[in-house]
Amino acid sequence: MKKHEFYLQRCIQLAKNATGNTYPNPLVGSVIVYQDQIIGEGWHQKAGEPHAEVNAVNSVKDKSLLKKATIYVSLEPCSHFGKTPPCSDLIIANKIKRVVIGTMDPFAKVQGRGIQKLISAGCDVVLGVLEEDCKELNKRFFTFHKHQRPYIILKWAQSKDGFIAPATQENREPVWITNSHSKQLVHKWRSEEQSILVGTQTAVKDNPKLNTRLWEGKSPVRVVLDRNLRIPQDSHLFDNTIKTIVITDLKTDIPPALKKENIYVEEVDFSLNLAKEVCKILYQHELQSVIIEGGKQTLQTFIDANLWDEARVFTGDCLFKNGIKAPSLVGEHPQKEKVNTDLLEIYKNKK
Ligand code: AOF
Ligand code: ZN
């Protein structure tokens, strides 16, 4: 591995120490190198706390080495006064000669201004080392700032013959397509995303809680599509335990069950591009990611609008022969990962 890549890899590794703790900020790592030795390291730990570069600079014992050193950082050093002062000013003030950056910051207040500041001050800047990995590290943050929408993950389970539910469900017994391990994995995924969304039919039929139970961690904000406000008022979704957004066409006459502090009723015109309208609402609520857990119609709405980034599909061993056909992905979606050989496949939507 080449030198720049090697140190950038370390930045990514450091950044990941704060996984799940930096929202709404990105994960960022930084190392400072002098004569091929790491003399300082740091990462951004939490929004409002020092950025990666500050922690890296502070960790250097002999500050006189800084002016002969190279700083590596997985994201462009910031140029603005946010909750903390600009990192580019810190680099300039410490006379660090060389700055190697993974990728540009898409945040509107930065967007290249940090790099510009460094160049104007005479720093030697290298941009775009392990760029794809650095973008992947903050895929939610990048999607949110670049496309003004959350990063969208679709999730469903299908039978071996491609159905998400059997034809008749008279006995109302839930049909298990996956096993307890995949169920736990789904709860881990919930803990990693900022919101979870289902359509009306899933909410009515399954009365889901949509919280994180089988994994330690936070529960995502719940989002439910309810065009005609027909989801029963005593549903778990309206138990006021977690922030819940109800997206409807009928904002007038909000039923009492929805007049609670944790429930937000948002009106959209369902005859427009629904997926797009939902994205606008989620963006307004500053949700950087959403996992869509069904049903068929809701998943297909996002697929048809080409508003999805990842699809996580479980395929069980059962055969349903007929029933509700699984959603079909359209567009360019190369198979990215195969986990547990045939149970889970993850597709990425190439933009
Ligand atoms: C960096 N290094 O480690 C991080 C950066 O409110 P503030 O001051 O924390 O600024 C937040 C913004 O700063 C965030 O949206 C992103 O653009 C950038 N994050 N920048 O140079 C870091 N975490
Ligand atoms: Zn900064």
Image: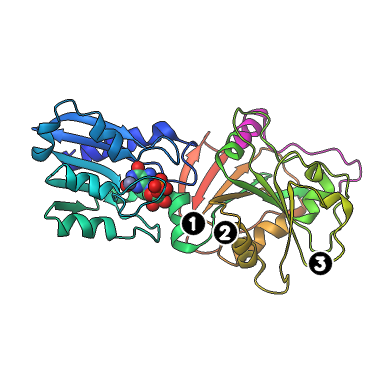
Answer whether residue 346 is magenta in the image.
Answer: no
Q: What stretch is highlighted in magenta?
A: 168-187
Which x, y percent locates residue 132? 33, 50
Viewport quadrant of the N terminus: top left
Q: Residue at x 57, y 43 (%)?
A: 193
Q: Which label belongs to residue 144? A: 1
Please say whether residue 133 is visible from this viewpoint: no
Residue found at the far bottom of this picture: 271
Q: Which residue is drawn at 22% across and 37% down?
A: 7
Instruction: Name the colour scheme.
Output: rainbow
Mark 2 to mark 3 CA distance (whole Å): 21 Å
247 vs 229, left or right, is: left
Q: Which label belongs to residue 168? A: none
Quarter-of-image position of residue 242: top right
Look at label 1 and name its amino acid.
Phe
Q: Is mark 1 within 8 Å of ligand 1?
A: no
The residue nearer to you, when weighing 17 against 340, is 17
Q: Is mark 2 on a helix, strand or loop?
A: helix
Whichever of labels 2 and 3 marks the residue nearer the N terminus, that label is 3
Answer whether residue 180 is magenta in the image.
Answer: yes
Q: Is mark 3 on a helix, strand or loop?
A: loop
Look at label 3 and name its amino acid.
Leu
Mark 1 to mark 3 CA distance (whole Å): 28 Å
Q: Mark 2 points at which residue?
A: 283
Is the C-beta separation of discs 2 and 1 under 8 Å? yes
Mark 2 to mark 1 CA distance (whole Å): 7 Å
State the predominant SS element of the stretch in magenta: loop
Quarter-of-image position of residue 278: bottom right
Residue found at the far right of this picture: 170
46 vs 329, left or right, is: left
